[in-house]
Amino acid sequence: MPRPQGFTYATHPDGTVRITHAGHPATTLRGPRAQQFLDEVKTTDPQLVMARWTGNYKRGNERTARNHPRNRH
């Protein structure tokens, strides 16, 4: 599976973490979830962690979608 790309995150003074994908807001984490995310992103590949936390990761149907007649070019 290809590695996700384009995710960034920013921490704010109030403890909020904002995750963006390709410059667009993907999710905002606050409180204990934000701290859990920051702990996890230190120990694992940040791109994979952010993809998982935002729900924006490969679902296994990409090949089927690519082969659908409306997606053929």
Image (cartoon, grey):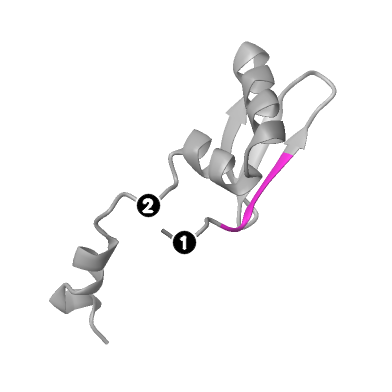
- Residue drawn at 28 percent across, 62 percent down: 62
- Residues at marks 2 and 1, CA–CA distance in whole angstroms: 9 Å
**Magenta range:** 5-9
Task: Tell me the kind of residue under disc 2.
Answer: Lys
Total numbered badges shown on the rendered structure = 2
Of 3 and 11, nearer the camera is 3
Q: Residue under label 2, please give it.
A: 58
- Residue drawn at 60 percent across, 48 percent down: 47
Q: Is residue 73 above or below residue 46?
A: below
Q: Is residue 5 above or below residue 8?
A: below
- Residue drawn at 57 percent across, 41 percent down: 50
Residue 16 percent across, percent down from the top left: 72, 24
In-image side of 2 versus 37 (left or right): left
Q: Quadrant of residue 65?
A: bottom left
Q: Residue under label 1, please give it.
A: 2
Residue extending furthest toward the left: 69
Task: Tell me the kind of residue under disc 1.
Answer: Pro
Q: Secondary structure at mark 1?
A: loop
Q: Is residue 50 found inside the magenta-colored segment of the image? A: no
Residue 41 percent across, percent down from the top left: 66, 34
